[in-house]
Structures are given as structure tokens and as C-alpha cells.
Image: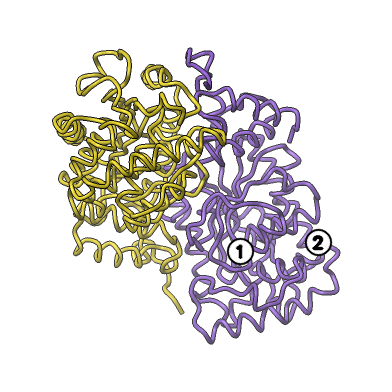
Chain colours: A yellow, B purple
Amino acid sequence: PAEQVLLQALARLDTLTKPVGALGRLEGVAAWVSSCQGVCPPRPFTRPRVVVFAGDHGIAKHGVSAYPSEVTAQMVANFLTGGAAVNVLSTVAGATVRVVDMAVDGDTPDVVSTFKVRRGSGSIDREDALTREEAIAAVTAGMRIADEEVDGGADLLIAGDMGIGNTTPAAVLIASLTGSEPVSVVGRGTGIDDAGWMRKTAAIRDAMRRARKVIGDPVALLATAGGADIAAMVGFLGQAAVRRTPVLLDGVVVGAAAVVAEELAPGAREWWKAGHLSAEPAHALALGHLSLEPLLEFDMRLGEGTGAVAALPLVMMATKVLAEMATFDSAGIAGRD
Amino acid sequence: PAEQVLLQALARLDTLTKPVGALGRLEGVAAWVSSCQGVCPPRPFTRPRVVVFAGDHGIAKHGVSAYPSEVTAQMVANFLTGGAAVNVLSTVAGATVRVVDMAVDGDTPDVVSTFKVRRGSGSIDREDALTREEAIAAVTAGMRIADEEVDGGADLLIAGDMGIGNTTPAAVLIASLTGSEPVSVVGRGTGIDDAGWMRKTAAIRDAMRRARKVIGDPVALLATAGGADIAAMVGFLGQAAVRRTPVLLDGVVVGAAAVVAEELAPGAREWWKAGHLSAEPAHALALGHLSLEPLLEFDMRLGEGTGAVAALPLVMMATKVLAEMATFDSAGIAGRD
């Protein structure tokens, strides 16, 4: 983002008809949008776009999730017919939703499976999620999807996740790159019981052991302990920065992809804001690692991009404040005593 | 709100295509909306309405504000031309804005001054803000305004404030009714310096002393230490409850009116949600007293209804989730393992 424009935006905020700083965090968001766009006042967003990356995970067969893997493909259909939470939130927020199948363990319509890398990623507690070639293909697919969206007019991007079992690789990636213990990153996911929690913790421990040797190589790390959906999000988030397009991050799975993307493309995080803080414990570690402050704390833990979309109106509002509010001069209003 | 419908709403939330509870606080908001409307699923809001209550305060002449009183009338004009922050936020949130002059110390257009009680309320550190008759007239005006709006189709109401000096009476009302010390309720308002802060603290102390004898009589309290704008908001918030219309509360000035309205009409708070937590210290005391949890914590301190409007999309989203999301059955999705 353009530092000169950031300063211009901060200065302009102080000329608007409100006390200095009175819009609180909205003001910082407004200035960030302006600096991402490289122009002050900023342009209100016209095409915020959500891309949901769907994929299954072999680990789900080993008792780490409350739901069976078949739900992933069923939810892809639900996104396409507009019945999922992210669809409903997006209609209110003024965003549109695209879903891509990166590794669903089942057949999905052609319109979503163009970039599919395989059926289900490997069970990361005992085998690699992907081959190196598959990891590169998935990252590249994510980059191409970001390019397609920006070329199609998207001016703000949101990545969402859908995949039974995906909080396990997310926790492994975050713990590995932040130097955390398995027990500090394991969460209840979609709602596992105590026995499931113990199995998940053990799976995270085993996968972290396998990941240790490739921790300095982001692509190898995605192949060892990620998955095609997460790898695609890594490419998507990195390419958004290359395309100078602001991103609103969602919860723990996107957060894991963001931590890896920042390793692969240092500085990419300057183009991201955190939409919310998930109830999943690993998410706070990821945001702390990226020095990002969540806009919302709503105890959400659904994924799909819902936490980011919930925060999207705040970003739209912040942008319009800087673009459309009257100044003291233009409104003929007296200044401070 | 209808308790039976609340239970129905909570049960329906668990049938939607998401893990139980995964939408966090959005789910509680959805159930609350449903219970206010007395129907499940709820109807998405079609006419959220902001009413900004403008009024001047004699105390502003005694160095408790960073801005001169003439700004109040100038800001009324700014609301009418759509240049203020609340106008801009409302265009994003899908709300419309009305402004009413209850006690501006200057002339305003007829369209906003129908209910005007006087020019400026008294300086509460040394005299009453209003006569008892004026206080009753202002409360009654607020009730009539709520009636007009609900009769006009408003299905969610937001009260906003505009008035140089108005955080001083707000702090006095909140401190008086929550049993707090002046120093724990005094804030920087629109941005006073240290000398102004000391004058404001002394004014709050003096006004609280005057208010002590009428603390059990809400109308007398408004006359002694409130103002016509705040009194009108009290009537507005109470009548919204009578008309079974949900309200999103704004910051410290509306919070003060809410505390008084709950004294006047116990139980009215069941119809209110807190939009945000203001940076003004008295606001947290008011919300705690009313047992309300703010939706946003954004360090906002502008008033005008901006904090409530910023949170409005979250309420719209919550409502649509319960109204429009697919159920596991309707989408043909497998349940938990």
C-alpha cells in the first residue's frame, strides 16, 4: 500500500465533519483502503468477491471431526444454490460468492472443479497431504483464481474455506510456524466431543512431527501438512497482494493459509485486514503472528468466509466515510473553540 | 418479546446448514429479532430508521466542550443534506435518517422543528435543564415520534444524538442512576483538553448534587439534569418497546436516555440491543446497568447514531440467516457422525 496516500487519507479524515478520531477504528480502516487503492479519497467498493475453497482431508477419516466427509460435496451444492450462511450474509453485505473444488472427495459440477487437484488430501498424521507437484498446482490455481477475479472487476477479495477436517491441518500449519504446542492450537472445530478432541490433539502432534523437517520451505510444508484447498488459498492471498487488491481474512483455516502466504511472499499481509477473531484457539496465534487486529469478536467458527463477510459492511462504511462525508469547509461548520 | 418464539428460533437455528452454534453471537441476535417480531422465521428488516435528536445545552457555555454551540444547528443542516457520518453509514446499512430539533439554540427548518421545546436546555450545574412541563412535552414528543415512525413502516429503530455539550448531562444521568463517582463517568467528549476535563468533572459533580433529590422521579431527573433532546429519546425508546419494535442503541447519550427509560418503563430494555461500546467511560456503566452486551467495540465516540448504524448490518445478517438459510433437510446434507 502507498504510504504517501495513507498520510493523505489520515489528514483528510481530520477535515471531515466530526471530532478528530471520533469514528475510532473505522478511520484506520478507511485510510488503509485508500492506501491500498493508491488514491484519496478512495473509491467505494463495487465488487467485493468471496471465493470459497473446498477440499476434503484424509485426517477426517480418523475421528477428528463431528461430521462425515460427504458433507463437503453436499455443502458445495448448497453454496451453488445459495442456501449456505456465506451466501445469506453476502446478500446483505453486497458481495458475490464463487466456490471452487480443489480436493473434494466426490464429484462436483464442472463449473467448480476446473482447478481440482485430487480427491481428498492425504491424512497428514501419517502421510503427505499432497505431492510437491500437487502443492505447486494448487498454489498456482489460487493465484490464477485471484487473477481471474481481479481481471473480472473484483475490488476486494475474501477467501473462505469448506472442508470437513480442515481445522486440523490449519492448526498444524499455525502451530508449526508460530512455534506453539499442539494443545494450544487444538479446538472443537465443528463441535467434537472430548474423545474426538484427544484424537485431534494426537493427530496434530503427529503431523507437526512430520512437518518439522520442512518448516523453512512453505511449498513443502503445504505438501506435508496442508491440503490442496489451503495451498490454493495461499496462492490466492499472495496474488491478491501482487494485484494490489485488499483482502478481508476469515477464520482459522484462512488464517493458516495467510501465515504460510506471508512466509512465501513477505509483506503480503499489508494488503490484508482480519475480519474477525474465530472461536478456534489457533486463530489468535495466527493473527498475532501477522500483527493483525480482528474487526469483530463474535465467537463465530463456521468458516466459508462468514467472519470476513460479517465485517465487510464496516469496511464499506469506512471507505464511504472517507469518500463521501462533508468537510467542515464544504458544510460551513465552525471548527473547535 | 415472545419467549415461546425465542425458543422456536433457537431450535430452528440448530436445523440450519452449519454446526450448532457456529455463527456465534449472530445466532443470539437472530433469535432476539424473531422474539421481538413474535414470529419464526423472522421477517428481514425493510425499513430501519434512524432519528437524530438535536439539542443544545447551557453547560456548553461553561467550557466543557471542544466545540461552540453554533455547531449543533450547523450539523442539523449537514444531516439534512446528507453530509454527516450517520448519513453515509446509513446508505451502506440500508437505513434512512430523520433529524428532529428538540432544543437547538438557533433556528432550524420547519421540517425538523415541529417538536421543539425551547432554545437550549439550562446549564445543569446551576439551574434546571427544563421545567417539568417542558420535560413532559419532550418525553411525549419522543413517544409521538416513535409512533409516527412505526406507523410509517419502520421495523427497527435507532436513536442518535447531536448537541454540543450533551455528554455532560449524559454522564450526570448515568452516574446518578448507577451510583458512580463523577470521575468515573467524565470523558473527553469531542476532544477537550485537561483544563476542560477539570471543568467538566466539576460541572458533573455540581449537577449530580442538584439531581440527588429527584433521583427516584425520572421526569424530574430529566428536568433537573437532562435536556429536551435526552428527554425525547427517553420517550422514543420507551414507546418503541410499547410498539414491540426492536431498537439498536448507540453510545453514551442514548445510553443515558436508555437508563432513564428503563426506570420509567421497566422491561423496555428487552427490546433493545447495544450497537457498540463507546470510548466514553460512562457508556460501559450504562450498558452494564442494563445488562446489555455491545455488538461492536470500535473506539467510536461520535454519536448521531453512528455506533448503532455501524452494527446494523450484523442485525440484518442475523435476521436473514434465520429467515433464509437452508436446513440440513432442505439441502439434503448429512448430519453429525
Where A257 falls versus B53 (above or below)?
A: above
Locate residue A187 relative to residue A321 in the image: left or right: right
Q: Which mark is residue B55?
A: 1
User: What label does residue B218 carry, if any?
Assistant: 2
Chain that bears disc 1:
B
A4 or A165, nearer to the observer: A165
Regarding residue A325, the answer to whether it shows in the image is no
As drawn, A92 above or below B301: above
| Mark 2 closeness class: few <14, some 14–19, many ≥20 residues within 10 Å | many
The structure residue drawn at horizontal position 52% and vertical position 36%, both measured from the top left corner, is: B23
Q: Secondary structure at mark 1?
A: strand
Residue A243, position as x, y percentages in the image: 16, 44
Residue A156, numbered label: none
Q: Is residue A205 visible?
A: yes
Location of residue B64 by image quarter: bottom right
Q: Chain of mark 2?
A: B
The amino acid type found where label 2 is placed reads Pro
Q: Could you say which is closer to the camera, residue B77 or residue A126?
A: A126
3D distance between C-alphas at marks 1 and 2: 19 Å
Image x and y of residue B174, in percent: 70, 66
Write the residue at 69% across / 32% down: B35
Residue drawn at point x = 48 percent, y = 62 percent: B299
Question: Which badge, 1 or 2, is on the more N-terminal residue?
Answer: 1
Query: Which part of the image, by quadrant, shows the N terminus of chain B?
Result: top right
